[in-house]
Amino acid sequence: MTPTALRLAGAAAILLAANTMPAAANDAPAIDAAAALADLAALQEKHERSAEARRREAIALLRAAVQSGASATRLYEDAVENQGQPDMAEWKKKNADLLRAKPFESALQLRLRYLLLSLERGRAPEGAARWAAPSLQYAADLARLLTDKSFNAGPKEAREMLQAPLGEGPFVRWLRLGPLLPPGDLWEHSPGELGGILEKNVRTAWRKEGNPRLDESWQLELNAGAALAESRVGRGGRAIDDFNNFTAPSLLFRRARDRAAAGQPNCATADLLDLARRYPAHPEFPAWAAALREMLGDKTDTP
């Protein structure tokens, strides 16, 4: 077939397809907007009641599970089984030593306790200050576990159990709790992230009200950081120097800013001046100098 014939055949096919296409369907009659909105409101209320009932059931289940390491392990086994583990008998046999290990039990208990705290906190943006003190208490218990020598010498799965975000764990997936957790920008989602818990759960709320207990949260993080650095001496050698010369000064700077916000500007100024004198080579020194100049009323630029 010649090129001209091919073009004519193609055009004829297009015309035939166009002629055989169905005409656009007529739209349905308009719905009653008021009635539809009323139905939607009722359905939304039903959804919220269902979510609240699921939250209460999960809270009751978790409260029982955190009472002991054995009960936490039983709930963990239930979660694994309900997540589709095909041969639980073989799985339990394979993981028998891990499931009996005290560090793993302790990590499970703490993870479940943090999930319980998170569900009790809920998604409401208001009332954040109410959960600051319970979060600080949890953080203190977490710091004790993280700095415990037997825990750090235990199976790596125990540490991984704490570091994984709540949404990635078997409990949240099994019980469909993801939509019930607080938003990530308001609440730390990793049960083992000490700094994040102190910053998001505790300090954010207490800064707004100038709570003097802010200092307590900083001291906890400083003490835990020093203990963790001490525990890593055999593995790196530089851990203590790095903490003392870089991490700790950064924390102390942020603590000073919070002291100023909590009504202790003179203490904050003295702290920052001492920090600048002791660590003039620190990478954050320009920020310290700028903050000091602001506190001292100096409007000139930092050299």
Image (cartoon, rainbow, N blue to C red):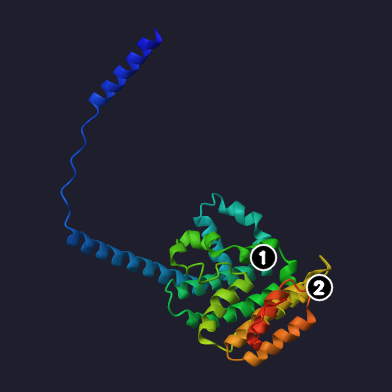
At 30% from the left and 64% from the top, the residue drawn is 44
At 58% from the left and 75% from the top, the residue drawn is 199
Q: Decide which of 210, 115 is in the foreground and name it.
A: 210
Measured as percent of width and height from the top left, residue 221 is found at 67, 78
* Image quadrant where residue 274 sits: bottom right
Relative to 199, 127 lies left or right: left
**How many other residues sit within 10 Å of disc 2, few (<14), some (14-19) or many (≥20)?**
some
Measured as percent of width and height from the top left, residue 230 is found at 79, 74
Measured as percent of width and height from the top left, residue 242 is found at 78, 71
Quadrant of the drawing holding the C terminus: bottom right
Circle 1 is placed at which residue position? 159
Q: Decide which of 11, 185 is in the foreground and name it.
A: 11
Q: Decide which of 179, 95 is in the foreground and name it.
A: 179
Q: Decide which of 276, 246 is in the foreground and name it.
A: 276
At 51% from the left and 63% from the top, the residue drawn is 171
SS of the residue at dot 2?
helix
Circle 2 is placed at which residue position? 241
Q: Is residue 262 above or below residue 40?
A: below
**How many other residues sit within 10 Å of disc 1, few (<14), some (14-19) or many (≥20)?**
some
Relative to 22, 131 lies left or right: right
Residue 148 visible (yes or no): no
Q: Nearer the viewer, mark 2 or mark 1?
A: 2
**How far apart are the alpha carbons under marks 2 and 1?**
24 Å
Q: Is residue 134 above or below residue 80?
A: below
* Image quadrant where residue 258 sits: bottom right
Measured as percent of width and height from the top left, residue 127 is found at 44, 80
**Residue kind at label 1, given as amino acid type:** Arg
Relative to 108, 178 lies left or right: left
**Residue kind at label 2, given as amino acid type:** Asp
Residue 62 visible (yes or no): yes
* Image quadrant where residue 152 sits: bottom right
